[in-house]
Image: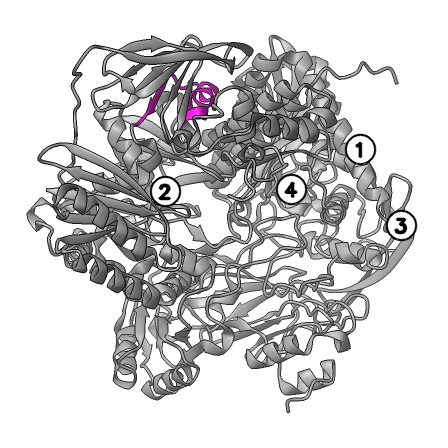
Amino acid sequence: MNKTPSQMDPITLEMYWRRLVSVVGELGSTLRRTSFSSVVRDTGDYGCAVFDRRSRLLAQTPDSTPGLCGPLRGMLNHMLQTHSPTTLEEGDLIIANDPWAGTGHHNDVSIMMPVFYREDLIGYVVTCCHQVDIGGRRATNESRDNYEEGLRIPVLKLYRAGKVNDDVKAFISSNVRSHETVLGDLGAQVSACHVGSERLRALCEEIGAVGFLNLADEIVRRSDEITRVEIRKLPKGTYSHESHIDVVGGKTLKICAAITVGDDTIVVDYTGSSPQVAPAINCTLSYTSAYTFFAVLCMLDLPVAVNEGTLGRIKVIAEEGSVLNCRFPAPVFGRTAIGNFLPDLVYQAMAKAAPERVCAGTGATPLWGQYMFGKRPDGQSFAPFNVSSGGMGARATKDGISCLAFPYNVGNTPVEIIESELPALVEERCLWVDSAGPGKLRGGFGQRHVVRLLEGDRGPIGEVLASFRGGRFVHPPEGLLGGGSAPTALLSINGEAKDAGNQVVLKAGDRIVSQIPGGGGYGDPKLRDPKAVARDLRHGLITPEHAKSCYGYSVS
Amino acid sequence: MITIGSDIGGTFTDFVEVDESSGRVEVFKRLTTPHDPSEAIESGLRELATRHGRVADVMVHGTTLVINAVIERKGAKTGLITTKGFRDVLEIGREKRFDAYDLQIEFPEPLVERDLRMEVAERLYANGAVLQSLDEQSVVAAVDHLLAHDCRSVAVCLLHAYINPVHEQRIRDIIFEIAPEMSVTLSSDVLPEMKEYERTTTTTINAYTKPVTSRYLKKLEERTLALGFNGELLLMQSSGGLNSAAFAREFPVQIIESGPAAGTLGAAHFARLAKLDKVLAFDMGGTTAKLALVENGRARRTNDFEVAHVHRFKRGSGIPVRVSVVDLIEIGAGGGSIARRTSVGTLQVGPESSSAVPGPACYGQGGTLPTVSDADLVLGYLAEDQFLGGRMKLDRNAAERAIKAVIADPLGISTEDAAFGIHAIVNENMATAAKAYVSEKGESPNSCALVGFGGAGPVHSCDLAARLGIDTVLIPPRAGVAAAFGMIVAPVSYDAIRSRRILLGSLEAEALTKVWHEMAFECRERLPKSVDLERVEFEFSVDMRYVGQGYEVNAVLDSRMIDAGSIADLQASFESAYRKLYGRTYSGTPLEIMNFRLSATTSRRVADVRHDASGPASDGRTGQRRAFCPRMRTWCDFSIHRRESITPGSEFHGPAIVEEDESTTVIPSGAVATVDHYGSLIIKLAPRQTLQ
């Protein structure tokens, strides 16, 4: 390595590093607010990132979904393979959506803009947004291959030297539903790219192109160094765990991880996980890697935001053809159903090595949600997606938080909003008693959520097409280090237990009950502070029977 | 007429007295009396009254009582009555993490424990129609339970009560029948707005703080009455408007955070007098800096507000309070912000700050961590013997030692470079936050002027302005008591809201008129009795969004009459607001209304006190000292000026430092400064005075 020592003093570095982080924040907040996709808005399924001219990730939006932790680098490199840097011109904008290169499914469309300062290429801005529609079959896990999942956009120039490529727009437009909205959201991404490129240019006005490269070197070098320091705090060795996931159709999948903490790397090896499956829940390696990076970074608790330097020492291995590294053209639309479980798996494996850095299994995984399509009595159609979360797992020194999204970050919809939109009544949304995994520290509580479709003139016109997401019907959220599991989940329609994932037809008066588990416990329940048990009893969160059987606590 | 503004702060209780007939302005400070804050008020009022042999006619008051009660959990034992199936709304919240990467995340404990959250059998449909009538027996049982558990206050928040309060009102009546002494808060009274979690937290905070506020105001009234004060007592609200003590007693949540609002209004007042129509009010104190956009003398407002954060600067980690507040950002940047070397070898300043004791190293109270004030002293901006009017001597050696040991040596730079690094980074942090804040409002910072106040604000204003591309800086007079002054110039105001989710296309003029009248009636009912209703000005606005989008944009309906044309006007107003924020509109997409708002204000007669020069013109220059010029990045001689000796109209050039008892203004080279006839120091920075 023949590197010149950096000329950047620590004060200038701090100032411009922060500037980069705030630039991506600015782009993200604009995209989030103007997007029509509720997935972008509410689940953070979007990302904005800036790269230097060596395509090193310098900063990315911090509130993006874990699935966006890192894969925009892969997308940028994929784009540059088709349009090499030397062929790029100022004002070019490149579009693509390959799930294997980027974020794991077609709806996420990435747009990249090369940034020029005084005619030199200095870096790239990449934005990625979950589009409301991408053609193909509607949001479903029933597609049989990737071709059924909608428009595959190869690496194309959406703009050439500032001029829009109408052919590309027309092609997209005629292949997606609600094309005005989709083109509008793509337009928002384009504007965000422009703003990002302006900000990078303004930064170069202050520190010059060489200064910018020095800044990039310093960010990456110092982040890499601190990541290594944190990794070295973990005991070296290989730590394994195997988890089971019940998926649609009553099947069980196995995912397993062997995590090797080395001198200055962490290798997460998923070899042995189940082969790819027929339902559209397969993860591409780039997506698996993103969730793994997220899990490891939370655990390392680094003082710096995600960038090239924080990702470089984490390696992810998964066998090709497995559910965590599926082969084209496997269907991938609902890949969160698997990807969401990876942080839990990583923490189960690492519990012995880093007990104070991890949390027990979360009841919020997988994401629970209800899609309902139908007509209101006033003739308006409705198509909301409402999400509910179970409880978070317990931590070394803290109980888990009740009803909290993890690792995705989707909030609920207020009941008053749901009822103003849907011809339905939410009869209950409350903590589910006895649903927290017991432990020295207990999990957060899950929830009981009951919805009934109204009848008569207040009910829906005709049938309601619904699909429910959820899981943990067979395999509950696990405890850690002696902590107990939370109970398994329940989904029922009119009292009859149901599986999640399939489309069902509902009619007026139908009542859907969801019992979403809490989080797993941490440590031996017998060691729990009796005062804490008494408090849960007083609050009616646990029954005397639960207190007795799990904690050996008797009400005197 | 004599008006007194009094603002209770952590350390001092500030008073400003304005006599409109003579134009006399008096400023006064007393140490705050935390055990009973009304004590300091009484002694201050007595002092001011004996000075002039006259008691004030109007007293305007701001207090941190309500927010402190929430933060310190010192409110009344409170119960909650809610719809069956929903006792856990407070605990379930919105189910979102405010920090995606934090596995040790924590949220504030609900103000009402679960065993005091009672469910009653009743149910409304979303349109307010009754599905199940109220089971009064379940109410009686709930109230009995709460009484048995010593609750003093009850919050009532039922689903859809924002559209039909009938069950909530019946519950209130039942409570009063059983327990006439009970303090009761209905969600339909406090916040008739959709979204049950935020409405419940807001209602609960009101209930929790109602008894303590009532006690405090009673004591305050007794004390002032004993002094012979029988004028009107007005309370400063978070919205930047005033309302009666009787209103505050009923709705304490409305006065939850009045200090920042008041300070912003004070800044806006002097900006208006200086004919600056768009300003960024910049208040920098010991621990935080606050920035707010003020246009045409009016601060922007928002309903997106939280209190009692687990992490002070992380949004989402607090308890939401949906009342109207001045829309400002708070940054962990103040004179006491601590500088440290990060684990990646850079320099960071704040958000942690040294508390009053030991305070910055230069306070000489044993502090060893370098702070912004230490850097400002080493750079020559602060004088060792002029701090707080000379009452506190600063220790320059201690400041240098701290910066050298903690920052300069570990980073391998000189102490002076480290000191300027601290100064520059804290300014850059504020500039970054300000840019994001201003651009989210569709504005650009360089179209604003900066109004700097607070203890540390004037030291940092010019460099911050340069970083924002701003060329005009105004430092108002009496910057150390800006909040108390802001109270005096604040208007009286009340804000009504009605949630009605409806497509704009289905809205009929009749419905619009009805909701307008309903809110206008409520405004008139809730404004102080002393207000001349003829002079009340109304601003009608609507929160709207494109169907499918999740963020509402507030569209102001700029018309006195509600008629068939109003609906088209609404669309136009929405589109222009939307375009300003996001640069475009969507022609084919339907619009949806979420909330109607009516804001009623009436301005009080304000003391626009003009001072004409008497005696010989002077620029107040007293000498010079070496200081580090933030523009030239070098040490040079700064002329030193005494603020009160500068006569209106006199002009002087930077590099200069203007000293007064409560603050110090740093003027870089190339800038020109004057004092206007209202006492504001106005600085024009050199063109394109940006960083190199």
* Mark 2–mark 3 distance (CA, rounded to whole Å): 49 Å
Please give the residue where the numbered disc 4 appears in the rendered image. Answer: A106
Determine contact: label 2, label 3, CB under 8 Å: no
- Disc 2 secondary structure class: helix
- Disc 3 secondary structure class: loop
| Near-viewer residue (A399 or B265) | B265
- Residue type of the residue flagged with mark 3: Pro
- Disc 1 secondary structure class: helix
- Residue B205 belongs to the span the image colors magenta: no
Please give the residue where the numbered disc 1 appears in the rendered image. Answer: A225
Place of residue A528 in the rendered image (x, y in percent of width and height, measured from the top left): 72, 74
Q: Are marks 1 and 3 on the same chain?
A: yes
- Disc 3: which chain? A
Tell me: residue A531, above or below residue B34.
below
N-term-proximal mark, 1 vs 3: 1
- Disc 4: which chain? A
N-term-proximal mark, 4 vs 3: 4
Q: Which residues are magenta?
A: B458-476
Place of residue A283 in the rendered image (x, y in percent of width and height, measured from the top left): 75, 49
Please give the residue where the numbered disc 3 appears in the rendered image. Answer: A235
Q: Quadrant of the N terminus of chain A?
A: top right
* Residue B426 sits in quarter: top right
Q: Are marks 4 and 3 on the same chain?
A: yes
Q: Dot 4 surroundings within 10 Å: few (below 14), some, or many (20 or more)? A: many
| Near-viewer residue (B215 or B399) | B399
Tell me: residue A331, above or below residue B192.
above
* Residue B346 sits in quarter: top right
Q: Indicate left or right for A17 with B615 as reference.
A: right
Q: Dot 2 surroundings within 10 Å: few (below 14), some, or many (20 or more)? A: many
- Residue type of the residue flagged with mark 2: Pro
